[in-house]
Image: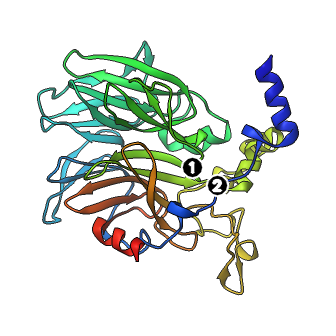
Amino acid sequence: MIDALRQWSDRLLGRGDAAITVPVFDGALKSNHLIEDAEVVAELDAPEDLASDGNSLWVADSARLLRFDAAGQRSEAQTFERSVSAIACLPDGGIAVALGGNEVRIVGGAHDGRGFDTANGRRLHAVNALACAPGDRLLASDGSKHEPPERWKHDLMQLGRSGRLLEFDLAGGTARERASGLAYAFGVCAGGDDAAWVCESWRHRVLQIGGTRDGHVVVDALPGYPSRISPAAGGGWWLTCFILRTQLVEFVLREPAFRKRMLEEVDPRYWVAPALSSGNTYLEPMQGAHLKTMGVVKPWAPPRSYGLVIRLDEDGMIRYSLHSRFDGKHHGIVAAVELGGWLYLLSKGRSRLLRLSVAGAQASLAS
């Protein structure tokens, strides 16, 4: 009863979950051009995820698994029968791959050939991120039980709340559900004390599951929708935000009649919704004078797509951020992996593998 009254008052007064305000880029989130100016390592077909074994960089590109060695030489390690939606390097040299979002398979290493397609009796549906955990375990985020990974936009517009955090025992061959009812689980990493951090995209936060602070919100009120998270050298984490929040989209999410008609009558490419890339067609909902005046981008222009990576410390505090702004092209950053002093980024919006020097980025931000 109390929750119902609170929700009603929030809708009446436009506060809480009913608010359409969006955090601004300020302080540690102050915008820059570091992602836009990053070096282009490779042009890809349909990139999905990145992983590193400490020596090489692995890239999931459609149904292919690519390997980039220390010299930057590219080779095709393996091709699968379906697209790869997530990858993770295992300590024993194996690779964990998610195929089509509904199967996790181990390739190489001590558990070569082992596979999982259910957890707690429910089939996997939208596995979009994998991460190793101590004790021969593998963590996974299963975004939605209704929509496959490529239909994330549909889940957002339908206010999806069916994501799960999963754990696979590679030695025993069992799988369990550690959390459910998440607002699109996209991104996971292992913390200490049996804890896991999972990104809850549609609630704009990173949540801790397990450990001494089970249910603790690690970082909240992000200006973007968080996705994959990976370790940073020297401690801390790299958190990607694959799309950005805007007041316009926040307003649409709170208008059920409009959303229903839009979903039924409009091509998804032209929805009033975030995108991994923009500026590609005159049919987009926001263009022209909405965004520019005399060729100059308006400071208040709502970015339909954006590139954003956030550096977190060990406790989840934001230290600094890297950007490809509204008028850039390296948008839709879905993965970031640090290797050999370089930060490798996957721009799904541009289908590019990028890299930039971590030390150089820190020096640029400090100047």
Q: CA distance from mark 2 to mark 1?
A: 7 Å
Few, some or many residues within 10 Å of mark 1 (<14, 14–19, 20+): many
Q: Residue reaching furthest right?
A: 12
Report the disc number at residue 222: 1
Q: Is residue 187 left or right of residue 139?
A: right
Q: Residue shown at 44%/60% (left/top)?
A: 320
Q: Is residue 85 left or right of residue 150?
A: left
Q: Which residue is mark 2?
A: 23
Q: Secondary structure at mark 1?
A: loop
Few, some or many residues within 10 Å of mark 2 (<14, 14–19, 20+): few
Quarter of the image for the C terminus: give it. Answer: bottom left
Q: Are marks 2 and 1 in contact (CB under 8 Å)?
A: yes
Q: Is residue 339 above or below residue 169?
A: below
Q: Residue shown at 48%/59% (left/top)?
A: 308
Q: Secondary structure at mark 2?
A: loop
Q: Is residue 312 left or right of residue 15?
A: left
Query: Mark 2 belongs to which amino acid?
Result: Pro
Percent of width and height locating residue 120: 42, 13
Say which quarter of the image contains residue 129: top left
Q: Which residue is at the front of the view, 148 or 244?
A: 244
Q: How many marks?
A: 2
Quarter of the image for the N terminus: give it. Answer: top right
Residue 65 visible in rendering: yes
Residue 200 visible in rendering: no
Query: Mark 1 belongs to which amino acid?
Result: Leu
Percent of width and height locating residue 269: 63, 55
Percent of width and height locating residue 174: 29, 15
Q: Residue reaching furthest bottom?
A: 294
Q: Residue shown at 67%/41% (left/top)?
A: 157
Q: Which residue is at the front of the view, 3 or 339?
A: 3
Percent of width and height locating residue 212: 40, 23
